[in-house]
Amino acid sequence: MRMKPTAERREFFRFDLNFSIRYRFAKKLADNKYKTSKLLKGIGINFSACGAAVKITKPLPVDTLVYLEITLPFCDEPLLATSQVIRRDLSSHNDKPVTLIGVKYLVIEEKTKASLASYRPENK
């Protein structure tokens, strides 16, 4: 018996695109101040108008703030977003630690969000 696929519970369509991204993470200090890391590189896995999944080498904990710089092929300017880690999966690749993090965007330009929301891979 063939079952129907379950309905997607996401608010926005999620699409797969694998390419380089840049990011910084913020570490909370005393008195609600933050220290940001240097700019690091990662690999984008998939994206939507409300979040993304990326592979990085740092094992960032859930709730960490992450600043993303992503150059998407269908946007004129890089996507800049302040986001928050909502999940993480630790693994390894070629004996090196790799973390897959899921982030939700906290701050993103409306124009960029609209571009992400309307993008479909078949529209390339």
Image (cartoon, rainbow, N blue to C red):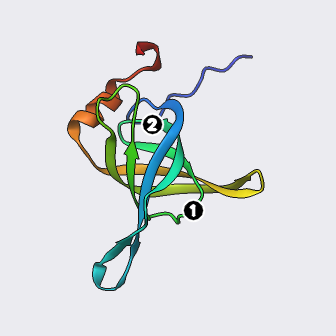
Q: Quadrant of residue 118?
A: top left
Residue 112 lies, in percent from the top left, at 27, 35
The residue singled out by tag 1 in the image is 58
Q: Residue at x 46, y 32 (%)?
A: 14
Q: Which mark is residue 80?
A: none
Does residue 109 lie above or below 56 as drawn? above
Residue at position x 32%, y 49% from top? 81
Q: Which one is in front, 99 or 42?
A: 42
Identify the residue at image location x=29%, y=29%.
Answer: 76
The span from disc 2 to disc 1 (Cα, nearest Å) is: 20 Å
Measured as percent of width and height from the top left, residue 105 is found at 35, 49
Q: Of the residues shown, which amino acid type is indicated by label 1?
A: Lys
Left or right: where 61 falls relative to 33: right
Q: Secondary structure at mark 2?
A: strand
Quadrant location of the C terminus?
top left
Residue on which disc 2 sits: 47
- Residue 87, given in percent of the width and then of the height, sits at 53, 55
Query: Label 1's element?
Result: loop
- Sequence order check: which comes first, mark 2 or mark 1? 2
Counting every numbered tag in the picture gives: 2
Discs 2/1, front: 1
Q: Residue at x 77, y 50 (%)?
A: 94
Q: Quadrant of the N terminus?
A: top right
**Would residue 59 appear left or right of 48 to someone viewing this image?**
right
In the image, is 103 to the left or to the right of 81?
right
At label 2, counting other C-alpha atoms closer than 10 Å, the crowd grade (few under 14, some 14-19, many 20 or more) is many
In this rendering, the answer to whether 79 lies above or below 3 is below
Give the residue at the far right of this rendering.
95
Q: Amino acid at mark 2?
A: Phe
Question: Residue 26: x and y, percent?
Answer: 39, 67
Are the residues flagged by discs 2 and 1 in contact, CB closer than 8 Å? no
